[in-house]
Image (spheres, helix red, strand yellow):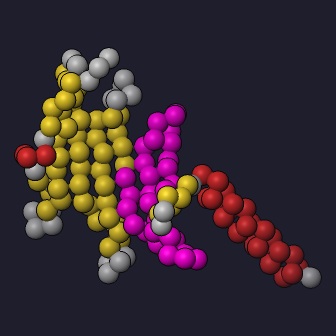
Amino acid sequence: MKTNVSFKKLILSSLFLVCGLAASAYTVNDFVYNPVEVNGLKVGETVYRNDGNTLTNYMNHTYKYDDQQRMTESETMKWNTKSNAWEKSTRVCYQYEGNNVTTTYYQWNKKKAAYVLVPEMTVTMQVNQ
């Protein structure tokens, strides 16, 4: 009887976990997005590929903000199925000066083990306030 009660608790707990994850995640086409918020700001998001009945890791995004709640950096990591680990991919930095915002794009270089600037992707735009 004791084993039966524990098994029921395990099944019930698993069901609550799945329902909780489903409530905070949303699906677009073949992907499921699971955002992470802190104090109303999205600080991260894991993207899963929906392969029928299973979800597999696909991408992971992290976001940083300044004291005015403007995004200052976003980093993207991609899932490597061979190494079974997240790998750095891109980083975009945002710099604010008056009504202008400059986005600077970096791509991960495995050989250098560092982000490398991609100058042609750097853009400065005027922002309406």
The residue drawn where x is 18% and y is 59% is: 108
Among the 4 quarters of the image, the one containing residue 64:
top left
Q: Indicate yes or no whether the magenta region holds residue 126.
A: no
Residue occupying the far right of the picture: 1
The residue drawn where x is 31% and y is 55% is: 76
Give the prevailing secondary structure in the magenta stretch: strand
Q: Indicate yes or no whether the magenta region holds residue 36.
A: yes
Residue occupying the far left of the picture: 119
Among the 4 quarters of the image, the one containing residue 110:
bottom left
Among the 4 quarters of the image, the one containing residue 19:
bottom right
Q: Is residue 124 left or right of residue 56?
A: left
Quarter of the N terminus within the rendering: bottom right
Q: Is residue 16 left or right of residue 42?
A: right
Image vertical order of residue 20 relative to residue 128, above or below: below
x then y, percent, for residue 106: 16, 50
x then y, percent, for residue 99: 22, 19
x then y, percent, for residue 126: 21, 24
Residue occupying the far front of the picture: 29
The residue drawn where x is 13% and y is 46% is: 121
Image vertical order of residue 106 relative to residue 123, above or below: below
Task: Tell me where the magenta segment starts and ends, as one range.
Answer: 33-61
Total marks placed? 0
Q: Is residue 66 left or right of residue 102?
A: right
x then y, percent, for residue 59: 37, 62
In this view, the residue in front, 6 or 52, is 52
